[in-house]
Amino acid sequence: MRKNTAVVLAVLLCVAMLAGCTQSKLQDEIKQKDEKIAQLQAEVNQLKEEIARLKAPSGSTQPLLTNLVTLYFIKSMPTEFYLHREDRLLHEATGTDLLRMLLEELIIGPRFPDLEPVLPSNVTVLSVQLKDGLATVDLSREARQLNVGARGEALAVSAIANTLTEVDGVTSVQILIEGEIVETLAGHVDISKPVRRDETVVIELK
């Protein structure tokens, strides 16, 4: 009798554990779907704004948004942080003007609610130069106010490099602070030398 009771209890325990796992998995799937819906809604809203601007009267002084660019922002996952792409339309620009515009958009931050900024909002782009594939960007001292750990700092640096190397002709990025070469932004990642693109920190969600 005791043996049968133990078997029944063991079966009930297994069923409870399976139910708990199934419920946890279901909640994770729901969360992922909600995040995807929020992202798609943000994309729809952005496209509506861009369409409205493109339909502006011919006499309007507002420049058209015709430049499709890719920015990189932080995406929080259950066990780690990554970079995630965000495409948006900007005013037509080329060369250093485009690079400056991309940096300013990075500082403004993401439009999608499930992404996080990579730089403090009070950072100023002081100058941008481009020579022989090297983009030299000079940022204000506020860029060193990153309140993040090693991973967050690495993602911030990679976000700058990955965003700017999306532009044809840019192969690496030298980050300056107030016109000076510094070793790090927040004590973890070496930026004393040019930084190249890093695809290993980018996650693509399906």
Image (cartoon, helix red, strand yellow):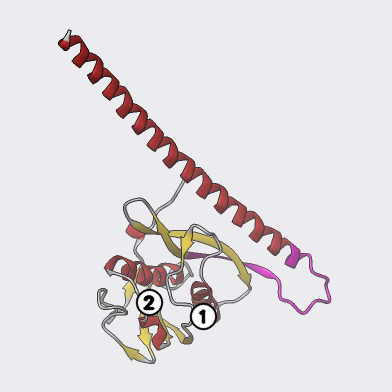
State left or right for residue 187 relative to residue 30.
left
**Residue shown at 51%/43% (left/top)?**
33
In the rendered view, tell whether residue 96 sits above or below residue 81: below
Q: Which residue is mark 2?
A: 173
Q: Which residue is mark 1?
A: 100
**Amino acid of disc 2:** Val
Judged from this view, the residue extending furthest toward the top is 1
Percent x, y of residue 77:
38, 53
State left or right for residue 6 relative to residue 192.
left
> Tag count in the figure?
2
In the rendered view, tell whether residue 176 sits above or below residue 67: below
In the rendered view, tell whether residue 133 sits above or below residue 21: below
**Amino acid of disc 1:** Arg
State left or right for residue 48 relative to residue 32.
right
**Residue shown at 40%/33% (left/top)?**
23
In the rendered view, tell whether residue 192 sits above or below residue 114: below
Q: Which residues are magenta?
A: 52-71
